[in-house]
Amino acid sequence: MNETIIILAMLIACIGILLYFVGWINTIFMALGKDEKIMGVIIFILNPVAIYYSIKHWDEAKVQARQLIIGLFIMCATIIPAYVYYSKNVIS
């Protein structure tokens, strides 16, 4: 039973990571498409800036902002409890 829950949590976390990654790439392409090449490079180097950029340009980047925020929420909702479970059961 524990193995099934762990595998399910890993799959859900992977979906969140993929969703965040797609939103990040879309934000880079949007910044480069708007001739903001420096901001595109900054977003590529400093990943969390993509959230700020997409929220700042909400009218044009509504889809990217939703992908980033939902992906981040899904990642945190699965990875943090998995880490707590792992640290209690394996490390102790």
Image (cartoon, rainbow, N blue to C red):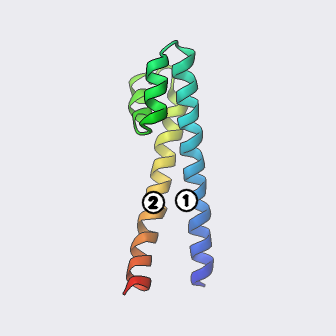
Q: Where's residue 6, x and y in %? A: 57, 74
Q: Earlier in the sequence, mark 1 or mark 2?
A: 1
Q: Is residue 4 left or right of residue 54?
A: right
Q: Which residue is mark 2?
A: 77
Q: Quadrant of residue 10?
A: bottom right
Which residue: 52% across, 12% down? 35
Label 1: which secondary element: helix
Quarter of the view holding residue 14? bottom right
Picture quadrant where residue 19 is located: top right
Q: Please provide percent x and percent y for residue 16.
A: 55, 52
Q: Is residue 73 above or below residue 81?
A: above
Q: Is residue 34 left or right of residue 51?
A: right
Type of amino acid at the residue the image marks with label 1: Ala
Query: In the rendered view, would you say 73 is above or below 40?
Result: below
> In what quadrant of the picture does the C terminus appear?
bottom left
Q: For label 1, count other residues whose C-alpha is less than 10 Å away and answer few (under 14), some (14-19) or many (20+).
A: many
- What secondary structure is found at the residue carrying circle 2? helix
* Foreground of the two, 2 or 36: 36
Disc on res. 70: none
Residue at horizontal 53%, vertical 29%? Answer: 27
Say left or right for 78 vs 8.
left
> Residue 21, image x and y in percent?
56, 43
Mark 2 packing: few (<14 Cα in 10 Å), some, or many (20+)?
A: some
Percent of width and height locating residue 69: 46, 42
Measure the C-alpha gap from mark 1 to mark 2: 8 Å
Label 2 is placed on what type of residue? Ala
Query: Is the residue 73 above or below the residue 54 in the image?
Result: below
Q: Residue at x 61, y 69 (%)?
A: 8
Label number found at residue 13: 1
